Amino acid sequence: MTEQSRLADRESVIQVKKMNKWYGDFHVLTDIDLDVKQGERIVICGPSGSGKSTLIRCLNRLEEHQEGDITVNGIELGDNVKNIEVIRKDVCMVFQHFNLFPHLTVLDNLTLAPMFVLKQPKREAEATAMKFLERVKIAEQANKYPGQLSGGQQQRVAIARSLCMNPKVMLFDEPTSALDPEMIKEVLDVMIELAQEGMTMLCVTHEMGFAKQVADRVIFMDAGQIVEENEPHEFFNNPQNDRTKLFLSQILGH
Amino acid sequence: MTTVANQRVQPVSGTTASRSWRWMRENLFSSPFNTIITLFCIFVIWNILEVILSWAVINASFGASKEACEVAAGACWAYVHAMYRFLLFGTYPAAEHWRPVIAMIMLTSGMLLSMNRRFWSPWLAVAWIVGFIAVYFVLAGGILGLTPVRTSQWGGLTLTLVLAVVGIAFAAPLALLLALGRRSEMPLIKVICIVVIEVFRGVPLISVLFMASVMFPLFLPTGVSIDVLLRAQIGIIIFQAAYLAEVFRGGMQAIPKGQYEAADSLGLNYWQKTFKIILPQALRLVIPPTMSTFISLFKDTSLVVIIGLFDLLAATRAAVNDPAWRQEFIEAYVFIAIIYFCFCFFMSRYSNYLDNDLKKSTSH
């Protein structure tokens, strides 16, 4: 389709080859192969415990993988601390529980990393921060503390905090799972807007509406393996694997 | 304050007297049983107060003369009056007593200024180091025409304050390093920190001081000697740092994993993550036990008496044994108990204030 051709000649931002990971004896991820093109929007879904969060957490080294290669922007992700630091500047993550810094104001949450990691002057970092706070429609809360905001507002601040690093890739780890239902939409709207602007996104989520609307590719994982991947129309209407069918019937059935 | 609080609870009516009468009726005499308890408590409190008052005030002698004391049945405050310089300055040469006064003013005002959050910056550490050097020269002399005074002549409250303030100022950063080291992933650093913490927590302060005073010189080459006050001070610092390190470590462990992950995912390096994200939150959590450690450090300085240093408590004990006076030990001990209490109570109140102040600024 047109979406696929849009990405055909793009460069790969993330390449994962034959990646394996164990927790002790437990084989969490098995032979993961993944190629993420620049500007590609990928939604990863699967039953809980299938390793989808672990997979994206390996991509910025919050988790170590034991076998296989991960390359981000052509840089090998391994034990080399310098490489990890370089990659983390480009790959930002939005967490299920927001993980804002509670002792800092919203504005300071946004400017901290740009000032200390990217060495931006304070004035510039604050200007950028206000720009992104306006984009997530929360600029008036800049001087409040995270504890004074609602869950949806906190998650939008967390997204803005990532954007301030001007990342090449954004990882979303179940960004709406900890939110009250009425707040999910405000966060999804921000994510949809980001997707439409061409941000490279990997998103672990159960929001299938979001997947249908913006994903270039949906990946289904089960028991630590990528079971099936396809563009959303095919994925939802014509799933191939039995496990995928079962999963889709469970989450779309009601 | 109470009237304001009362006004909020109930509408204003009547005079202060009638309102307090109503308060008493509602809270102290609301039932026969409560009335009995109230009367019993008044009886007990009155008996205790009477003993204290008759000793400290009614039967006490306030004159400066020793003779008046001989006849007075109660406290002899002339004794404290005669001895207070000795309690404050120990054996410091009498003509130079203005110097320990200046030193104490510098130390306490330094503490007071440091309590204000507005002054919290790296410059504060620099100011403290400069301040300590200044205090040292004020007391030790030898420059600017000041008469040299050996550290063995420092004493009384002056010595207690020096030991406590220097102890707190150096124990805290050392404790921080030990706590970070113990959580480090580098095996050598981790082992060293665990050994230091466990060894110093595992022995009494008295034995640390004793080793610093008696054993330590045996390891030095002949001709080299380190001042006994300095040795005791280092002993106190390491001992309290070992305790404090575990307090700090506990605080760091209480910080959720997500905070570390958020800092990591933003590309902050170890030191940025530690000093900007983890420690500000961890130290906030452990303000009460930290202050507790400081308070016990303050009181534990009195143990230096066993290695011949002459702190506030040791000076008091010496003063009590002065044969020129009858055995007036209670007055002297009451006097220094008040001094100790003022410092410790103040630290405790400050801890509460800081705790609430920081909470207020970040909560709902």
Image (tube, helix red, strand yellow):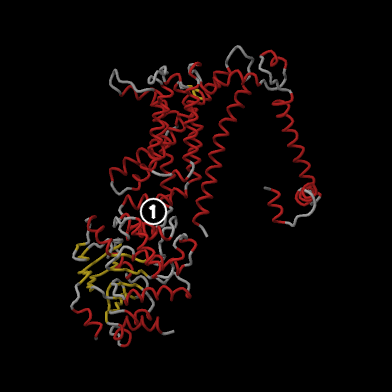
- Residue B66 in the image, given as x and y percentages of width and height: 66, 14
Q: In this view, does B241 lie above or below A74?
A: above
Q: Is residue B253 above or below residue A235?
A: above
Note whether B161 is above or below A28 in the view shown: above
Chain letter belonging to callout 1 = B
- Amino acid type for the residue under numbered disc 1: Ile
Q: What element carries label 1?
A: helix
Query: Mark 1 — residue?
Result: B277
Q: Quadrant of residue B216?
A: top left
A246 and A105: which one is in front?
Answer: A105
Residue A5 sits in which quadrant?
A: bottom left
Q: Return the x and y of residue B109 as percentages of the image width and height.
A: 49, 34
Quarter placement of the C terminus of chain A: bottom left
Identify the image quadrant of the N terminus of chain A: bottom left
Q: Please state which of residues B185 and B259 is positioned toward the viewer in this rendering.
A: B259
For label 1, count other residues whose C-alpha is less than 10 Å away and answer few (under 14), some (14-19) or many (20+).
many
Indicate the position of residue A235 as horizontal and vertical percent values.
Answer: 30, 84
Percent of width and height locating residue B59: 73, 23
Depth order, front residue of B66/B212:
B66
